[in-house]
Image (tube, rainbow, N blue to C red):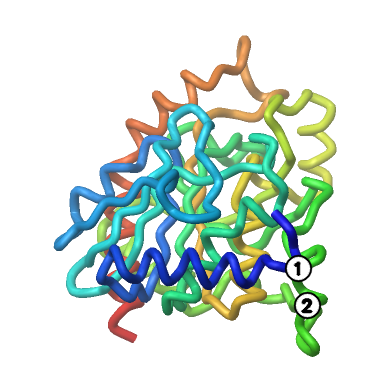
Amino acid sequence: MDLKSYFKCVDEAAAWLGERSGVKPEAIVVLSAGLSGFVDHMQSKKEISSSEVPHFPRARAEGHEGKLVFGTIRGVPLVAMVGRFHFYEGLSPQEVVFPHFALAKLGARMLFTTNAVGGVSRKLKAGDLMLVRDHINMMGVNPLVGIAVQRKKDQFTGMTQAYDPGLCAIAKKAARKLKIPLKEGVYLAVSGPSYETKAEVAAFRKLGADAVGMSTVPEVIAANFLGLRVMSLSCIANPAADLHRGTMTHAEVLDTMQRLAPKAVAILEEVVADAGRE
């Protein structure tokens, strides 16, 4: 995509979505593979394939359906991205976050992301949920390259509170209410699509990472640039390489996500509803 016309394309995609969805979403909810059950809890749903939206990328990752579902949760208007776009699919970082720019243009003010990750910390096990308090970007890319400088001011985005303290507090409260254990930690993002080596995981642990994955960080950077409040929920799908027995597979990840889904969806629903009432 030509970055000089990036914002023109954003306007066109947002206008197209506004006409067809009939919803002005307050929140964007990004659903990782295995968490599509969240949309079953939505009301007044309108489903749109991302492949139909002008300028949107095409989803190709296994387990990511590539559709947008507009609707409400307990009266809060939102759009659920059932599946996300990844740098490892061959997309540029700017293409990865393009949907977030368009949906923010529609009026979204909050971003709730989920991801399936490997547990780097020895305190995490497969099946755990982790609230992200901060991240380490080891992807080697930033989605704001070429975009931020098109602004005449506010070109440098602060990331000291990348994950909104208020939304994180709501997530912790929701977990307590639902009696679902919720851990907290630092998420480290790599480009993928290969899994990490044992030596890499050991190095990440020394850097202070608790979990590792291949997504989310570009979205969070873009959301902060756009002024959206952010909360991220990591689903520990497997132990990372140096803690894992045998060969790591995507099938293992999807199986764990299916088992995790009811807990993750319950917290998400509660958080979106509470945050939307603020």
Tag shown at residue 181 = none
Identify whether 44 is placed above or below 257.
below
Q: Is residue 234 left or right of residue 172?
A: right
Residue at 61% over, 57% down? 97
The CA distance from mark 2 to mark 1 is 8 Å
**Whole-percent x and y of residue 145?**
81, 63
Q: Quadrant of residue 269?
A: bottom left
Amino acid type assigned to the residue bearing label 2 in the image: Gln
* Disc assigned to residue 4: 1
Q: Looking at the image, which residue is at 64% across and 35% down?
A: 89
Q: Is residue 117 above or below residue 227?
A: above
Name the quadrant of the N terminus: bottom right
* Left or right: where 77 falls relative to 145: left
Residue 83, position as x, y percentages in the image: 44, 43
Estimate how packed mark 1 is, as few (under 14), some (14 to 19) or many (20 or more) residues with alpha carbons within 10 Å.
few
Q: Position of residue 240 (x, y in %)?
A: 65, 29
Q: Residue at x 84, y 27 (%)?
A: 199
Q: Nearer the viewer, residue 264 or 105?
A: 105
Residue 150: numbered disc: 2
* Secondary-structure class at tag 1: helix
Left of 94 or right of it: where is 150? right
Structural crowding at the residue carrying mark 2, measured as other residues with C-alpha within 10 Å and reported as few (<14), some (14–19) or many (≥20): some
Q: Position of residue 203 (x, y in %)?
A: 84, 38
Of the residues under marks 2 and 1, which one precedes in the sequence?
A: 1
Residue furthest bottom in the image: 153
| Secondary structure state at the residue bearing disc 2 | helix
Foreground residue among 238 and 103: 103
- Say if mark 2 contacts mark 1, CB within 8 Å: yes
Residue at horizontal 75%, vertical 63%? Answer: 3
Q: Is residue 188 above or below residue 231?
A: above
Q: In the displayed structure, would residue 175 be above or below residue 48?
A: below
Q: For the residue marked with disc 1, what is the amino acid?
A: Lys
